[in-house]
Amino acid sequence: MNTSRRLPYLLMLPGIALLLAVLYPFLSGVYWSFTNFDLTLGQNPAFSGLTNYLQAFALSGEGLHAILVTFAYAALAVAVQTLLGFGVALLLMREGLHIRFFRALIVLPLLMPPVIATMMWRVMMTPDGVLNYMLSWVYLPAFDWLGSTSTALFSVVLIDTWIYTPFVILILLAGMQSIPTEVHEAARVDGASYLREIWNLVVPLLRPFFIIVIVFRGIDSLKMFDIIYTATRGGPINATMNLHVQSYFTGIRSLNIGYSMTFLVVLWVLCYALAFVLLRVRRGRLA
Amino acid sequence: MFGKGSSKASRARRRNDVLAFVALLAYTAFALFPLFWIFLLSLKTQRDVIATPPKFFFTPTFQNYAEVLSRPDFLTPFKNSVIVTSGSLLLSALIALPAAYALARMEFRGKEDLAFSFLSLRFAPELIILLPLFVIYQSFGLYDTYIGLILVYQLITFPLMVWMMRSFLEDVPKELEEAVQIDGGSWFTSFRMIITRIALPGLAASCVLSFIYAWNHFVFALVLASQRTQVITGGLLQFISFEQIQWGAMAAGVMLAIIPEFIIAVFALRYMIRGLTAGTVKG
């Protein structure tokens, strides 16, 4: 009996070892955020208290700006994709449409590397590119999609939406398919209109699936790196500089390790706050 | 669902069906247009690439593909991606399979906490581990090496595999162990039976989806690799970074990098939802 009690831990040993191995760089990094560690100076890190945090989030304003961009990007991306994805999923659920066929086509953007998807959009978003050309067909003005501070954030969110809306569609479709048809029939017998049926019936039943969508998409867009780095490198003039990209430029490019870790610690806290929502949902066995 | 109403409403219903179909086509066009455009680009000569206004009709050529396939700055990252991705998958499978089995088939204290700790690796912003590793790897000689990359790729492939494999292993009925025990078999007998027969398709799907995630990943190699072991995502980004814009070649490279993925993905589409949510939703 004794061996069988230890067996599960034995089986998990390699996994636990990996976790512990990750803990070392993680804790070093968190510690460095309280030091003046800077690779260009080559010194041994010396404890400096909250200096980096004050510098980033109070004195320079870099950190606050990055937090604002991080939230704006995540809020926009999650809101647009959840609504659009829900709409498309509803369309797919209508009778007589070929769900499987459309689903296979729609999912393609999700399967490719975000970096490569973003490169494709960069080509299309140049001033002489095909997007502006197509806008001219319907007499709309051209945009400097990624080159202007007023449009850059929306343009990167557009790319994000192109890649990740299929994620929302797939999850919500799975949810819709789990709703028994009797529920809809009952609603129709009661004379509920289509919109009423969606709002009063489908949305509440899909709650756990919406939570999954918002947690996964929320975390991934809070820590978005690939799309922003590839599309704008945080520019123009920091218009798309979120915490993750900011930490790359201060840490890897300027080698100011201690300072850049402060952005990451703050970002990590944000991501984990959302992740705990998921944990509680699972604990409640909602999903 | 939302189907057949009364016959009075049938004209309105037909009109709504048409509207719904048009809306769906519009979204599909949005989803496919960039792929279509990049495919056109890959078949253009440099002159057609830079033509304004952009050309929809032109004489196609395969010279971009021929060029890309002869360039070491495409072939080396491609080869590196194959090595790093398959190495990471192999290592992850070795670590994840026993852990997933324990999480799915056994009861023990701290189970959910451990499971969530594994998943939390996927939710961390990558650089919070990468930035310290950037410092640590250089002092250990792991910077710009295959081993170093394979180790760090565990951050993405391991949590995915554990959670997906767990969700597939949970699907196997609990009675199986009991039956094996009655026959006098050990836990290893049931373990072998489950993974080699019953759960095999699910386990394979876990590998396929982890492959896609690893292949698509960018920031690990951006930070921890240089020219020698750079992977395909970082490699292709170089094509666009230089100012003498070789978009035709880049587009051909893009097509070559994603088509294998699409082919593989078609086989695993059924299991896609579990992959995307790390097994938290069973699609």
Image: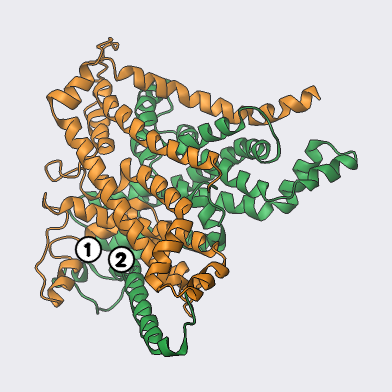
| x and y, in percent, of residue B146 in the image | 47, 36
In 3D space, how far apart are the residues under numbered discs 2 and 1 (Cα atoms)?
8 Å
Q: Is residue A276 above or below residue A3?
A: below
Front-most of residues B206 and B168: B168
Location of residue B102 by image quarter: top right
Number of residue marks:
2
SS at badge 2: helix
Q: Which chain carries label 1?
A: A
Q: Is residue A137 above or below residue A254?
A: below
Front-most of residues A92 and B72: A92
- Circles 2 and 1: CB atoms closer than 8 Å: yes
Q: Name the residue under label 2.
A: B34
State the residue at coordinates (36%, 66%).
A87
Chain letter of the orange region: A
Q: Mark 1 points at which residue?
A: A124
Packing grade of label 2 (10 A; few <14, some 14-19, many >=20) is many
Packing grade of label 1 (10 A; few <14, some 14-19, many >=20) is many
SS at badge 1: helix
State the residue at coordinates (17%, 36%).
A65
Label 2 amino acid?
Pro
| x and y, in percent, of residue B267 in the image | 56, 62
Label 1 amino acid?
Met
